[in-house]
Amino acid sequence: MSDADDVRRLALSLPEVVEIDSDGFDFRVGGKGFVWSYPERLPGKPRVIRTDVAVLFVGDEAEKQALLLGEPDMFFTTPGYDGLPLVMLRLTQVSPERLSELITDAWRMRAPDDVEAGLTAGLDNELR
């Protein structure tokens, strides 16, 4: 089980991440969002920022569908995200280890090449 504090800790541990001021959490790298709080919009009601649900950048529709079909208890989407490479993640359903993997993958897809290469080089050095 994970929560918004885990998202914040993991996102801020990655190079060149900026947290945008929001009612929940919102993280960017190179000016591009990679994980943020889900802004739930229900008909006839004001928008509610859900800090128990993270929106993750996943890169493409194939990856999105693989996550949605493979782990429906953990991932979901809404019509407002149709055609976008984004999924919603129920934080209470994900382990901190898996959350770290998902956030790092989202960050890698959004980070500028030179920043991502720096993380990869650092990880390679740690493994030696």
Image (spheres, rainbow, N blue to C red):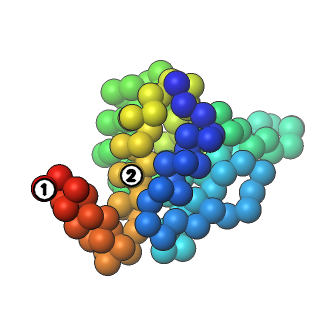
Q: Amino acid at mark 1?
A: Arg
Residue at the spot x=36%, y=61% of the render? 109
Q: Could you say where residue 38 lies in the image, as x and y percent from the top left?
A: 65, 44
Q: Residue at x 44, y 66 (%)?
A: 15
Inspect this view and state whether residue 19 appears: yes
Position in image of residue 23 (x %, y %): 78, 51
Q: Which circle marks residue 104 in the picture? A: 2
Residue 21 location in percent, x, y?
Answer: 73, 62
The extreme left residue here reads 128
Tag 2 or tag 1, which sits nearer the N-term?
A: 2
Task: Bin the neighbour count of mark 1 within 10 Å (Cα to Cα): few under 14, some 14-19, many 20 and up.
Answer: few
Q: Are marks 1 and 2 in contact (CB under 8 Å)?
A: no
Disc 2 crowd, CA 10 A, few/some/many (<14, 14-19, 20+): some
Quadrant position of residue 47: top right
When the figure is inspected, residue 47 is found, relative to residue 18, above or below; the finding is above
The circle on residue 128 is 1
The amino acid type found where label 2 is placed reads Thr
Image side of residue 66 versus residue 4, left or right: left
Q: Name the foreground residue: 33 vs 18.
A: 18
Please tell me which residue lies in front, 11 or 77.
Answer: 11
Q: In terms of depth relative to the viewer, which is nearer, 69 or 128?
A: 128
Kindly tell me whether residue 82 is visible in this rendering.
no
Q: Is residue 108 above or below residue 52?
A: below
Q: Residue at x 26, y 64 (%)?
A: 122
Label ID, residue 49: none
